């Protein structure tokens, strides 16, 4: 009888193990999506290792988040407290007010302002949230890999492989999903950005701290500015107006990539387009092929100069310019040049200067077919029909 009981237990165990082993990838993802969408509150801590597009080193970023659903808040539906490597952010809705502010550790200031966007990343799992939307997308391949353990917890491992599209190649996201809770415990992401010839690599690890509503609610409702930070209120920063059109081009010096030092006043007598950019600015780099098209279209009627104020590794910058097949000159300048001389705080910014050395126009930002949109402006400034 005892042997029969042991055999029964063994058979049942094998049955459950077999069922668990053969759970489909789709079922794993749908279960995880359902569990996440039904959470009422959560506190997590996460660490993120990432590589900036313009930096060879990997940076480390830490975050702890407490969030709880709030049905009285029709805007976001949650109250959130976020503490990370750079500061503390709070969004809390009460019956008569919305309490929101941002604390910055770097300069010991705080702003009482609405900060939109970060609430949706309440688990620090933005990749997971976005990926859930792609569960039924057949163009994205979902593959179950070998099970692994994260913090001694058995996890399903599922990888999303995205098709090469535009500038994105070799793009995948890997999820380690707890077999018991179906919450993702770790996420890894990899992408190669063709335009930048540089990897952006992120490795996100998340540790769940609590599901206790009373604990999380108390943490958010009782939060006060830490006294040891000695914070002072900071007035909202207002971006200054660009140096006025009609002003003379400020004189500054720089170093030609692959050449000698130059003075910008040496270029007076040419119609100039000063393109302020740096490698880590994605849209600066996206604009480069269109600047090349303008150079080819206008020939010697215009002179395009790339003004780089951020990338100090000359060899790396030279390699990057060669990779992008940029034929117009690039001048490396001090970081203060765009800010102090032109009031430029956004990149890319194109400054148009006539033959007399007078600023006649600015264009900031990037848009597709940039050359098509700039040609009428340049024609007008050159008095071309």
Image (cartoon, grey):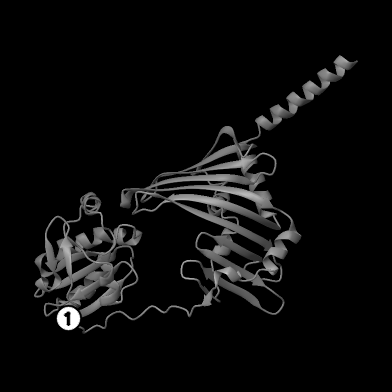
Q: Report whether 323 appears left or right of 56.
A: left
Horizontal and vertical percent for residue 375? 22, 70
Whether residue 205 is visible to the viewer of this picture, yes or no, is yes
Horizontal and vertical percent for residue 305? 18, 65
Horizontal and vertical percent for residue 24? 63, 35
Q: Report whether 352 appears left or right of 232.
A: left
Q: Report whether 255 appears left or right of 32.
A: left
Q: Relative to residue 281, is residue 345 depicted above or below?
A: below
Q: Secondary structure at mark 1?
A: loop
User: If the image is split into quadrants, where does the C terminus sit?
Assistant: bottom left
User: If the image is split into quadrants, where does the N terminus sit?
Assistant: top right
Q: Relative to residue 128, is residue 92 depicted above or below?
A: below
Horizontal and vertical percent for residue 14? 73, 24
Q: How many residues crowd around disc 1 within 10 Å: few (fewer than 14), some, or many (20 or more)?
A: some
**Residue at 16%, 62% in the rendered image:** 255
Whether residue 133 is visible to the viewer of this picture, yes or no, is no
User: Which residue carries the number 1 mark?
Assistant: 358
């Amino acid at each position: 009888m005892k042997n029969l009981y042991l055999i029964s237990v063994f058979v049942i165990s094998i049955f459950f193990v077999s069922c668990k082993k053969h759970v489909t990838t789709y079922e794993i993802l749908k279960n995880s999506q359902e569990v996440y969408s039904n959470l009422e509150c959560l506190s997590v801590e996460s660490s993120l290792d990432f590589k900036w597009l313009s930096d060879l080193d990997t940076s480390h970023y830490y975050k702890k988040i407490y969030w709880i659903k709030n049905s009285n808040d029709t805007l976001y539906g949650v109250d959130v407290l976020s503490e990370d490597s750079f500061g503390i952010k709070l969004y809390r809705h009460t019956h008569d007010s919305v309490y929101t502010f941002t604390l910055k550790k770097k300069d010991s200031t705080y702003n009482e302002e609405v900060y939109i966007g970060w609430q949706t990343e309440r688990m620090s799992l933005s990749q997971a949230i976005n990926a859930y939307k792609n569960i039924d997308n057949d163009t994205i391949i979902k593959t179950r890999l070998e099970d692994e353990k994260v913090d001694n917890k058995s996890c399903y491992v599922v990888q999303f492989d995205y098709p090469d599209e535009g500038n994105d190649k070799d793009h995948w996201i890997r999820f380690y999903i707890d077999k018991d809770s179906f919450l993702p415990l770790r996420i890894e992401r990899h992408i190669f950005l063709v335009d930048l010839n540089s990897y952006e690599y992120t490795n996100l690890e998340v540790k769940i701290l609590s599901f206790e509503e009373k604990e999380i609610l108390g943490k958010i409702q009782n939060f006060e500015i830490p006294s040891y930070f000695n914070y002072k209120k900071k007035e909202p920063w207002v971006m200054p107006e660009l140096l006025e059109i009609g002003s003379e081009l400020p004189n500054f010096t720089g170093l030609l990539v692959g050449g000698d030092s130059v003075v910008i006043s040496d270029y007076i007598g040419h119609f100039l387009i000063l393109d302020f950019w740096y490698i880590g600015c994605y849209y600066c780099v996206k604009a480069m092929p269109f600047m090349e098209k303008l150079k080819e279209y206008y020939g010697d009627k215009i002179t395009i100069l790339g003004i780089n104020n951020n990338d100090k590794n000359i060899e790396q910058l030279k390699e990057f310019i060669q990779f992008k097949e940029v034929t117009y000159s690039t001048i490396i300048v001090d970081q203060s040049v765009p800010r102090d001389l032109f009031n430029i705080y956004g990149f890319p910014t194109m400054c148009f200067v006539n033959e007399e050395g007078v600023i006649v126009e600015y264009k900031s930002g990037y848009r597709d077919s940039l050359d098509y949109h700039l040609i009428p402006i340049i024609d007008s400034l050159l008095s071309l029909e």
